[in-house]
Amino acid sequence: MDTNILLESGTNELEILEFQVGTNHYGINVAKIKEILPYKRPTAIPNAHPCIEGIYMPRDTIITIVDLARSLAIPESEDVDKDMYIVTNFNQLSIAFHVHTVLGIHRVSWADISKPDESINNSGKGVATGIIKLNDRLIVILDFEKIVSDISPETGLKVSDIDQLGERQRNNAPILIAEDSPLLSKLIFDSLTKAGYTNVTVTNNGKEAYDKLCLYKENGTLKEKVKCVITDIEMPQMDGHHLTKLIKEDNALKHLPVVIFSSLVNDEMRKKGELLGADAQLSKPEIGMLVEEIDKLLFK
């Protein structure tokens, strides 16, 4: 799915596809979308998860269909033949989501997207990553990665990869993480700690991470506080691409290795990250590869 914003770098903007399930308005980052297709009754799979509607083969690739209404506990469509599939690609997976109505694309700033509070995302169990007010309605940005990993946990972060790294020595090199998902933030923190990296600071988005870097720079503690930055791409307030741009354009910060660790790392987004100066880019399931990349960057 071609959009102009994918050709730009570090603008802290994104394009959101707005759609409906029932009467509710939801959004998905256009960067995750491969195509939008009209609904066609899928082939059912015996003993599949209740939210898996079946499989569909529009061309030469078999795609799993997730019924988003079932996943969100919303009544199913009254006229399914008018429904749509949003075909996505993230975490190295191609999955289609069955939605009821596709409304259009909006260009917005991450700064205008609010992070849901704990009453909505209690203990990181919710599936809303952001909320944006557009005209007279609220659009909820869904955590599609969590929806999929709740259905199939093996598609999530491969924490077991850390065990395959073998015995490792303790390392006190300070690492700064920008990650808005409480669950993923904890998994990354725990994985790095298990891999021997014991001096890890976690922030909730790119803005918090950048504010810390600026504070360390101003009080002269940057060298002691940060040796490497790990950032997601999709985050409210400031995304990982804009954070990377700000770091690499600052003479006092540009020496810091920046690792983009995101479900959105594909060929197109990889080019964007390279233009911004990212030192490494990895897809989110590969936590073992993340540790190996940090090893290389800190001890090259």
Image (cartoon, grey):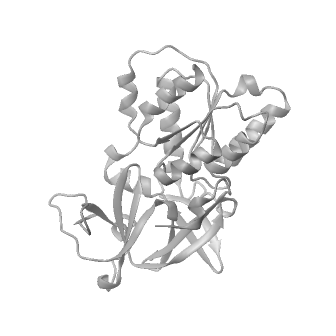
Image position of 297 with respect to 5: above or below: above
> Going by the image, does 111 lie left or right of 22?
right
Residue drawn where x is 53% and y is 33% of the image:
189
What percent of the width, then of the height, locates residue 208? 70, 44
What percent of the width, then of the height, locates residue 108? 64, 67
Image position of 41 with respect to 171: above or below: below
Q: Residue furthest left?
A: 46
Residue drawn where x is 50% and y is 29% of the image:
293
Residue 171 shows up from this direction: yes
Asked which quadrant contains residue 172, the reply is top right
Image position of 202 with respect to 221: above or below: below
Work out whether residue 24 or residue 232 is closer to the camera in this orientation and state it: 232
Image position of 207 with respect to 199: above or below: below
What percent of the width, then of the height, locates residue 105? 55, 74
Residue 51 shows up from this direction: no
Quarter that holds the C terminus: top right
Residue drawn where x is 56% and y is 60% of the image:
6
